[in-house]
Image: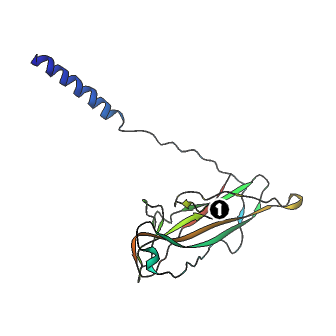
């Protein structure tokens, strides 16, 4: 009986260790598309300064609180006829300044920095979050008359996000964007 129990235990151990080792690696595949003809960012919209309102820390007194949402637009011109939609894809600058848990921009202020405050990006149309590293809402390109190049204006927002009760101070954040097309 003891030999049978030992054999059953050995078999159970062998089966369970095979299942444990079966999922230790995998593959990540990337697929994408690059195009030659693209829109141009309208002069003056390359670098945008969004001034968030000055708020009381009481409005951001706990984790997950959001306040001070402020709209901004990015306009594009000279869109070829083949481009029917455009969006901003928001990326971290040098892989820095992003909280990977929240997907928000971290506070980069170095002097008198507010504590526990981040900046969250939003799609203006439905107020959904745009995590840094993702593409915002797609906007239709309005074709120009008589085969002239098209234009589009993309509308987004940024605002404060509290990771815990905030402390008073300065909030600064930066994000890079590139144009994405459908």
Could you say which is closer to the camera, residue 2 or residue 145? 2
Which percent across, then down, holds residue 12?
23, 25
Q: Dot 1: what SS?
A: loop
What residue is shown at x 32% (from left), y 31% (from top)? Answer: 19
What residue is shown at x 14% (from left), y 22% (from top)? Answer: 6
Which percent across, then down, holds residue 115?
39, 76
Could you say which is closer to the camera, residue 39 or residue 138? 138
Q: Disc 1 designates what residue?
A: 125
**Location of residue 81 by image quarter:** bottom right
What residue is shown at x 54% (from left), y 45% (from top)? Answer: 30
State the scheme by which the image is colored.
rainbow
Which percent across, then down, holds residue 170?
46, 81
Which percent across, then down, holds residue 62?
40, 70
Please indicate whether residue 86 sits to the left or right of residue 111 in the image: right
Question: In the current view of this chain or complex, which residue is farthest to the right?
Answer: 146
Please indicate whether residue 98 sits to the left or right of residue 51 in the image: left
Please indicate whether residue 92 sits to the left or right of residue 26 in the image: right
Q: Please, is residue 83 above or below residue 119 in the view?
A: above
Question: Mark 1 packing: few (<14 Cα in 10 Å), some, or many (20+)?
Answer: few
**Across the whole image, how many numbered discs are drawn on residues?**
1
Q: Quadrant of the N terminus?
A: top left
Could you say which is closer to the camera, residue 1 or residue 97? 1
């Amino acid at each position: 009986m003891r030999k049978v129990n030992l054999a059953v235990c050995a078999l159970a151990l062998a089966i369970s260790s095979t299942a444990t080792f079966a999922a230790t690696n995998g593959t990540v595949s990337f697929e994408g598309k690059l195009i030659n003809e693209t829109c141009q960012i309208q002069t003056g919209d390359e670098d945008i300064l969004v001034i968030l309102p000055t708020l009381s820390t009481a409005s951001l007194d706990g984790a997950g609180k959001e306040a001070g949402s402020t709209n901004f637009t990015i306009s594009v011109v000279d869109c070829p006829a083949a481009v029917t939609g455009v969006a901003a894809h928001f990326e971290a600058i040098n892989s820095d300044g992003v909280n990977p848990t929240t997907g928000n921009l971290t506070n980069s202020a170095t002097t008198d920095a507010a504590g526990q405050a981040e900046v969250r990006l939003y799609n203006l149309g439905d107020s959904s979050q745009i995590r840094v590293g993702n593409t915002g809402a797609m906007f239709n390109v309005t074709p120009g008359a008589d085969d002239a190049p098209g234009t589009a204006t993309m509308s987004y927002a940024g605002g404060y996000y509290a990771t815990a009760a905030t402390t008073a101070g300065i909030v600064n954040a930066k994000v890079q964007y590139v144009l994405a097309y459908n």
